[in-house]
Image (spheres, coloured by chain):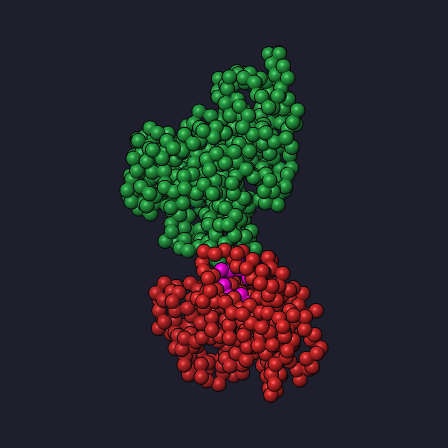
Amino acid sequence: MILKSKDVLGLEGMSAEEIRGVLEIAFRFRAVFDRPVRSVPIMRGRTVVNFFHEPSTRTRISFELAEKRLSADIVNFSAATSSFKKGETLRDTAENLAAMKIDMLVIRHSSPGSARYLANVLDCSVINAGDGAHEHPTQGLLDIMTMRQRLGDLRGKKITIIGDIAHSRVARSNIWGLTKLGAEVTLCGPPTMVPGVLERMGVRVEYDLRRAVAEADVLNVLRIQLERGAGKTFPGNREYHRMYGITNEVVRSLKPEAFILHPGPMNRDVEIAGEVADGPRQVILDQVANGVAVRMALIYLLSGGDPGALGSSN
Amino acid sequence: MQWSWKRIPAEYLVTNVKIYQGAKISRRLGFLHVKKGRIEQVGVGAPSREGLPVLDGRGMVCAPGLIDLHVHFREPGQEEKETIASGSLAAACGGFTSVVSMPNTEPAIDHSGMVKYVVDRGKEAGLCRVFPTGAISKGRQGEQMCEFGDMVAAGAVGFTDDGSPVANGALMANALKFARMLGVPIISHAEDLSIVGNGVMHGGYWSARLGLAGMARAGEDAATFREIELARATGGHLHVAHVSTRGAVAMIRRAKEEGVHVTAEATPHHFSLDHSRCRDYSPLFKMNPPLREPEDIEAVAEGLTDGALDCIATDHAPHTATQKEYQFDQAPFGVLGLETAFAVGVTYLVKNKVMDLGRLIGLMSERPAGVLGLPYGRLEEGAVADFTLLDPDHTWTVSVDHLQSRSRNSSYLGEELTGKAGATFLRGRLTWHDEDVIGAE
């Protein structure tokens, strides 16, 4: 068994061995993508519910694609199109889902801890597709997969995460996963977005962008939530771009082989300059492709798929 | 005549008990002689009177009925959470005979008719004395002052907009002045909402790790500082509710040394639990002020020991199971306290040798009575016979069966605690009896 739990709630709860095991399977699925027939019908006759309590486009599409390539039956709920609204407790939601006898639940919810709550009360597998500012484990895994694709073993590799760490579930999943794999993680952004206490998670906090990226092998540039606090948590887009934006000038100061991730969607010319977003250092489309593979791997493993049946990734 | 739990006689003796007296517990066993609701005699050794029904206390501690300066009984308006009757039973179960109720009901207790309603409902339930506080401002909106004089005449013992801090400093200053004239305190829920923002737990490592919005200590510290300066300027009596930060404890200690008329309380959860308890996102650890850091817990315990803080109050805040089924960030603030307060004190303060049992009981009876000048909280001849028999060695695991509140939101569910009230008496009448603690015959 590669995964010890019936659920994937966060990278905090996964061991380095589990993370490596999942990525190994994900790389094999990446190989499947290049075949003319890309489906692996292990989920035939099983039902996956994608419950998105918060708007999402790319994560939801990525999950759906992964589920379809495994031939699952899919039901989509979203806050906008269902009766699930703020006011109904998650317990009621859970009981409704349990009564429908589903095999797997993919949950995106604005409240931290919501995926774990559902996992505790439901018998089916639960995959966290983002719970508030807490974790987004599939994004963390696809980021790590993209890094491993180029760097191999991440032990001793220097990864700098830049942006609104305080409000970022992507950052937390990256921190847990990367530190477990032995990478050296630096967090960078203005102090209003990067609480110094996060050093207790075993990472370095650096408020100066030039210093934070000088030795980095990888930059993971997070999306700035413009709606969250221009003028409050940072003075404005112009100031952010000037101090923390990844421009061509910043890129020129990087190690020659360093590359750049961004979880999307991008605010061009805020956290990342348009020319960098389109430039040779970014690996954003690899992240997107790896996202489908990672989600296929998790669904496959949680459904009891045999890792040996997929052949080798080489 | 035999003692009978079923029919409490008008005159009786409680024997073989250790007596609480002035923050000390007698080493020798003593007795309490109760006659027509008053204490006829109290002392160590054997009682001189014979022929009365005798309740054998079996070595338990006979303490003044406990007094809680901070409870939310939710009536009127939120009777699904608690009523004055159910809250009174929870109080009796915890060894309490007097409680001070907060005015954040729906509608708020903001005029004399509402004060009288609470007083009457308390008397109707008859399980403990319920002393209402009134709101500082109409509807607790922080704008227009309520009729303090009329409300004091109806039985209000202090004023507070608890739960909704008074943002307007001039209104707070005027409230302190006006209340001073009436001889009652202003009770402050010291919180600067512009600092705390949308926080749901203490702002620190755990909030950052869990992805929950934090409530900075500075929000409580800044508000406490303002209240102290307003009390200094007006000469009014400021009572600071549920002190939870190291900084606030230090400020209150210094203000007292400087002669400011300030008193303060701390809750059992703030001297026992830290913010790491939120790690599983259980709303049973969500309250305001939030659980803070180990150094704050130490400072609160130290404040209770050296007198910076005057008493222990529970901030008993019932919420239905449904409301606590919401996710941590959506669930309401507040936890129960009455049924577990004494046990949490014994477990975390007495057993950890922070203070002795006598001091703990004093902080839960004589001292809170002193804050409001209530004529209770002492065992002395002629006093009203409000008392409780406490077993400081009784160990129990908290379960919902132990809770008498209508709600179930205790932070201590599943935890093993030591100390329990075996029987509670109000004006000499039995209001609570736990047969697991003291025998049924």
Quadrant of the image for the C terminus of chain A?
bottom right
Q: Is residue A69 placed above or below B148 in the rendered structure?
A: below
Residue at image position (41%, 81%) is A274
- Colour in which chain B is drawn: green
Q: Can residue B264 be seen in this view?
A: no
Tell me which segment is drawn in magenta: A106-118
Relative side of B144 to B401, left or right: left
Residue at image position (64%, 64%) is A6
The spot of residue A79 in percent (x, y) is 46, 65
Quadrant in the picture for residue B63: top right
Q: Is residue B81 visible?
A: yes
Quadrant in the picture for residue B431: top right
Quadrant in the picture for residue A175: bottom right
Q: Is residue B84 placed above or below B56 in the rendered structure?
A: below
| A117 is within the stretch colored magenta | yes
Quadrant of the image for the N terminus of chain A?
bottom right
Residue at image position (50%, 29%) is B127
- Colour in which chain A is drawn: red
The spot of residue B306 in percent (x, y) is 50, 36
The spot of residue A85 in percent (x, y) is 45, 60
| A108 is within the stretch colored magenta | yes
Q: Is residue A247 placed above or below B309 in the rendered structure?
A: below
